[in-house]
Image (cartoon, rainbow, N blue to C red):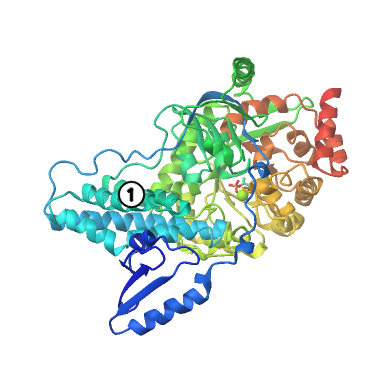
């Protein structure tokens, strides 16, 4: 930012001089704590630059004192592996790979000026993607952890790196080759540095290089190249949504929790998964045989013959039970005492809706419409949305679909919705709060929903509602979106109960809605102050905590039979939780498509009077473990 030219030299090692404006060159000084560094500046603001650098050095470059960084988290602190999506998977470990090794330049190079423009456009695209990732990381992890993206962004604007690429283009290289060459020389220089931390950063240079090459080729995002069990640190919702089911037979994540969106998507797609397995999982080499049980949370690296035999027979048993449940899945789920419990599916697309129909779902109890909005750089148009909603309803043979309005913020950032940097994003502008600020986006979505609702039965559902006024404001946008005609006659309006205060204050909302749907994923995190994706509090996060169950019970009693109450959180598919939820008064549930047959089969084994007695005892239990023991005891008696 200064009008000056600056060079740096490491006087201790003799490295340099290098231009101070280039991160790629400054890193090669390998300047460590205690080294002497010479700063030389010339130009109108030379003095200011030197003063600024000296002041920075005095402030220890604004680094936190070492003791504040805290001890490294030992590998054994991982609570897992934890069960995240039921089923057995056996196969080789596979990592996500970016298919960028192919040629970034087809045919002959264009004139140098055009090749340079191609590179500039690709760099701008990579910059935009990185900025979106950075915004998400600041919100989800904090500014310090997001710092890595600052370094990546800095590299994209690195004057020396760009000069190298420009020179190669001028000498006749196509853009991709020039960029690869320039990146490789920085990567090689960093990989040769004496300090191991800086050496490790060569991987960052390569990652930034790959981002640009990917943009240049229009290549696809990271994916599996061969079938097997996907091993990764964690998955973003967009990554999880984009997995190729033909290749991914199982998922093992070092981080994450069973209620993260990656786990939810794995369940929706019936991919067995374990999460929170700890950092040592990432040392597993590509191709290493793995066996995992997503129902119990077991993960075995390099299983012996005996273990494999055990897993194979468990997989066979699992498949036999599933096949039996599936043959009856199209029938209604009626309890032993004759009460019909609707079992819907939680879906994110028309493809999911087809899977839901095949699994015998009675309806779509939760359409996470945000998946239409994720992974793109502008929102879908009203017409695009209407088409998708109609396709979802069509795939379900015209059965009722519950369209939840855009639920972003928290762990689901959108690149084109400018979300503020918040210290606690899960307690900030999420769900309906953000939607009411982005009124155009909400209004367009509600227009699409109204159009769909004139053709097929639709419920519209607002997420994360905590204030009656939010519901009133959202309904006003809905009325405007409906246009001069009144609201479509078959359109019903409801809210998700995800905030404890809402659960306790349900009566105040009743005059303005037609149904309630309890989102136990979020309700649990807010009731127990335990973030749903945080593996360190995964042991606290449990829907079976008597306090959380009490909130479910209050919602049902608050609704006083005047509107139906459902559960669309993942807990409805938990065989331990289901009888208690029904006992508390829940009368319809919505679960991952793959879980529909099993939930319907379980409903048919239950008696509501027994469920009520069980729920009463659960509310009196001291903790979630006590509740689980109760259910296990009830199972033994029946
Ligand atoms: C929930 O919170 O329970 C829910 C169903 O919504 P989501 O998981 O999409 O936040
Ligand atoms: Mg939610």
SS at badge 1 = helix
Q: Quadrant of residue 276?
A: top right
The residue at the point 29 percent across, 47 percent down is 213
**Which quadrant does the N terminus fall into?**
bottom left
The residue at the point 49 percent across, 38 percent down is 393
The residue at the point 27 percent across, 45 percent down is 217
Is residue 295 depicted above or below 312 in this figure? Answer: below
**Which quadrant does the C terminus fall into?**
top right
Q: Quadrant of residue 271?
A: top right
In the displayed structure image, the side of residue 177 where residue 428 appears, left or right: right
Q: Position of residue 462 (x, y in %)?
A: 59, 53
In the displayed structure image, the side of residue 108 where residue 268 appears, left or right: right
Q: Is residue 248 visible?
A: yes
Q: Is residue 475 visible?
A: no
Camera-side residue: 546 or 584?
546
Camera-side residue: 532 or 62?
62
Q: Identify the residue under disc 1.
A: 188
Q: Residues within 10 Å of mark 1 (few under 14, many from 20)?
A: some
In the displayed structure image, the side of residue 32 where residue 174 appears, left or right: left
Is residue 357 depicted above or below 211 in this figure? Answer: above
The residue at the point 78 percent across, 37 percent down is 580
Q: Position of residue 304 (x, y in %)?
A: 60, 18
């Amino acid at each position: 930012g200064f009008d000056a030219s600056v060079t740096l030299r490491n006087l201790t090692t003799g490295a340099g001089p290098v231009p101070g404006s280039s991160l790629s060159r400054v890193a090669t000084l390998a300047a460590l704590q205690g080294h002497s560094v010479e700063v030389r500046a010339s130009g109108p603001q030379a003095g200011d630059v030197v003063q600024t650098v000296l002041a920075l050095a005095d402030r220890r470059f604004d680094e936190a004192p070492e003791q504040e960084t805290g001890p490294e988290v030992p590998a054994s602190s991982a609570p897992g592996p934890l069960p995240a999506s039921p089923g057995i998977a056996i196969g080789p470990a596979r990592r996500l790979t970016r298919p960028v090794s192919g040629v970034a330049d087809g045919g002959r190079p264009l004139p140098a000026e055009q090749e340079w423009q191609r590179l500039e456009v690709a760099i701008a695209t990579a910059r935009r993607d990185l900025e979106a990732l950075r915004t998400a990381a600041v919100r989800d992890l904090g500014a310090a952890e997001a710092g890595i993206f600052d370094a990546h962004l800095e590299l994209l604007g690195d004057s020396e790196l760009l000069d190298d690429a420009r020179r190669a283009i001028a000498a006749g290289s196509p853009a991709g080759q020039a960029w690869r060459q320039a990146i490789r020389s920085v990567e090689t220089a960093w990989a040769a540095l004496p300090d191991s931390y800086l050496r490790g950063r060569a991987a960052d240079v390569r990652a930034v290089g790959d981002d640009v090459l990917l943009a240049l080729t229009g290549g696809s995002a990271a994916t599996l190249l061969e079938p097997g069990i996907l091993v990764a640190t964690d998955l973003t919702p967009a990554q999880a949504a984009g997995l190729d089911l033909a290749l991914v037979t199982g998922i093992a994540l070092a981080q994450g929790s069973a209620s993260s969106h990656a786990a939810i998507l794995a369940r929706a797609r019936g991919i067995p998964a374990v999460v929170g397995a700890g950092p040592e999982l990432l040392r597993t080499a590509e191709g290493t045989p793995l066996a995992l049980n997503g129902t119990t949370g077991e993960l075995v690296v390099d299983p012996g013959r005996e273990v494999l035999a055990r897993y194979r027979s468990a997989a066979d048993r699992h498949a036999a039970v599933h096949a039996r449940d599936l043959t009856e899945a199209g029938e209604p789920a009626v309890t032993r005492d004759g009460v019909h419990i609707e079992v819907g599916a939680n879906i994110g697309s028309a493809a999911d809706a087809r899977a839901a129909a095949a699994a015998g779902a009675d309806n779509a109890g939760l359409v996470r419409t945000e998946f239409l909005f994720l992974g793109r750089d502008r929102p879908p148009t009203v017409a695009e949305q209407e088409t998708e909603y109609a396709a979802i309803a069509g795939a379900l043979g015209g059965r009722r679909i519950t369209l939840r309005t855009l639920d972003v913020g928290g762990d689901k950032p959108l690149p084109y919705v400018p979300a503020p940097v918040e210290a606690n994003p899960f307690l900030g502008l999420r769900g309906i709060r953000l939607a009411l600020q982005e009124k155009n986006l909400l209004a367009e979505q509600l227009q699409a929903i109204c159009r769909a609702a004139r053709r097929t039965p639709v419920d519209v559902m607002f997420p994360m509602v905590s204030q009656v006024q939010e519901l009133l404001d959202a309904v006003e946008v809905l009325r405007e979106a409906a246009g001069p005609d009144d609201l479509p006659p078959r359109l019903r309006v409801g809210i998700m109960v995800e905030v404890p205060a809402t659960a306790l204050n349900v009566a105040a909302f009743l005059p303005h809605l037609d149904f309630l749907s309890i989102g136990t994923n979020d309700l649990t995190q807010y009731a127990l102050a335990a973030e749903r994706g945080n593996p360190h509090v995964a042991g606290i996060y449990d829907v079976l905590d008597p306090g959380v169950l009490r909130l479910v019970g209050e919602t049902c009693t608050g609704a006083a039979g005047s509107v139906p109450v459902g559960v669309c959180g993942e807990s409805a598919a938990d065989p331990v939780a289901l009888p208690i939820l029904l006992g508390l008064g829940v009368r319809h549930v919505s679960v991952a498509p793959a879980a529909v047959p099993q939930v319907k089969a379980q409903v048919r084994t239950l008696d509501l009077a027994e469920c009520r007695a069980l729920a009463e005892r659960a509310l009196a239990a001291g903790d979630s473990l006590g509740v689980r023991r109760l259910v296990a005891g009830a199972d033994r008696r029946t």
